[in-house]
Image (cartoon, rainbow, N blue to C red):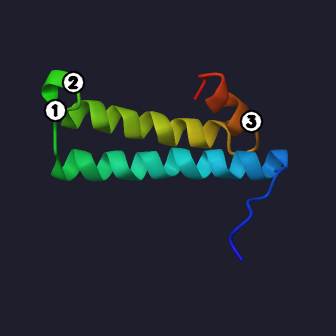
């Protein structure tokens, strides 16, 4: 038998997944800022990656009590 994904998620599950995504993005951006690669022609620099990581962590903190999923969908995170 194959895996059948869950069809309906609760708002809490969606928020938890969105928070995980934000924190994972922050971690990956920090690692790339430390080790590269960088693509200055695409504005992917140590500074831009560090700023993106900080924004992700700030958004995760801001929405830790709810609303992370909606914020991501509406571009507010």
Residue 31 pos. (x, y %): 28, 53
The residue labelled by disc 2 is 42
Identified at 63% across, 45% down, the residue is 18
Residue 7 pos. (x, y %): 82, 52
Instruction: Locate residue 50 relative to residue 16 in the image: left or right.
Output: left
Identified at 66% across, 22% down, the residue is 74
The residue labelled by disc 1 is 39
Q: Quadrant of the N terminus?
A: bottom right
- Quarter of the view holding residue 75: top right
- Judge depth for marks 3 and 1 and give the one in front: 1
Quick check: 11 above or below 40? below
- Residue in front for this viewpoint, 64 or 3: 3
The residue labelled by disc 3 is 67
User: Are the residues tagged 1 and 2 within 8 Å (C-beta)?
Assistant: yes
Identified at 14% across, 23% down, the residue is 41
Q: Which secondary structure, mark 1?
A: loop
């Amino acid at each position: 038998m194959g895996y059948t994904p869950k069809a309906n998620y609760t708002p809490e599950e969606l928020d938890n997944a969105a928070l995980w995504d934000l924190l994972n993005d922050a971690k990956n951006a920090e690692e790339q800022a430390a080790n590269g690669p960088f693509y200055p022609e695409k504005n992917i620099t140590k500074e831009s990656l560090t700023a993106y990581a900080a924004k992700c962590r700030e958004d995760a903190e801001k929405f830790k009590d709810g609303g992370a999923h909606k914020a991501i969908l509406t571009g507010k995170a």
